[in-house]
């Protein structure tokens, strides 16, 4: 019984210390680029390359709106680096500006 209490106390201590030293989850940022894409081939090229950039979690390519949305870890990559990666594939890319409400 004494060993069981000691084991239980050790387990609680371990769990407490693990929580104390646990790092924050890195934040995932979303950015949308307006690109010079116009066909399925363009989409395939982006989908074969951009997901392999550092920190990229998800990529969505929308041909009709010519938009590429990238979800990435802020601690691993930046919006500028991702823009350069898209441009390296041969496309122009600009960060989409948020719509402003008219009043």
Image (spheres, rainbow, N blue to C red):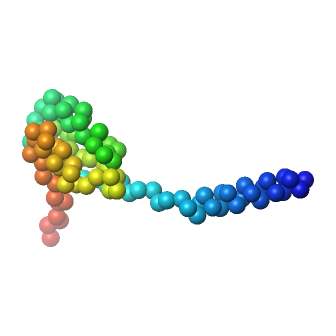
The residue that appears at 32% across and 56% down in the rendered structure is 74
The x and y percentages for residue 15 are 66, 57
The x and y percentages for residue 13 are 70, 61
Tell me how many marks there are: 0
**Along the horizontal axis of the image, is 5 left or right of 91?**
right
Determine whether 46 is above or below 22 in the image.
Answer: above
The residue that appears at 84% across and 52% down in the rendered structure is 4
The x and y percentages for residue 12 are 72, 59
Among the 4 quarters of the image, the one containing residue 102 = bottom left
Residue 59 visible to an observer of this rendering:
no
**Quick one: which residue is furthest to the top in this view?**
41
Q: Quadrant of the C terminus?
A: bottom left
Determine whether 54 is above or below 78 in the image.
Answer: above
Among the 4 quarters of the image, the one containing residue 18 = bottom right
The residue that appears at 90% across and 53% down in the rendered structure is 1
The residue that appears at 55% across and 61% down in the rendered structure is 21
The x and y percentages for residue 89 are 14, 38
**Along the horizontal axis of the image, is 87 left or right of 76?**
left
**Along the horizontal axis of the image, is 29 left or right of 86?**
right
Among the 4 quarters of the image, the one containing residue 8 = bottom right
Determine whether 50 is above or below 33 in the image.
Answer: above
Residue 24 visible to an observer of this rendering:
yes
**Quick one: which residue is furthest to the bottom in this view?**
103
């Amino acid at each position: 019984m004494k060993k069981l209490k000691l084991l239980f106390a050790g387990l609680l201590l371990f769990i407490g210390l693990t929580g104390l030293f646990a790092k924050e989850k890195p934040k995932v940022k979303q950015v949308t680029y307006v690109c010079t894409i116009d066909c399925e081939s363009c989409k395939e090229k982006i989908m074969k390359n951009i997901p392999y950039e550092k920190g990229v979690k998800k990529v969505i390519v929308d041909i009709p709106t010519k938009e590429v949305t990238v979800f990435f870890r802020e601690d691993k990559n930046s919006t500028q680096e991702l823009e350069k990666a898209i441009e390296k594939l041969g496309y122009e890319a600009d960060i989409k500006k948020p719509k402003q409400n008219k009043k």
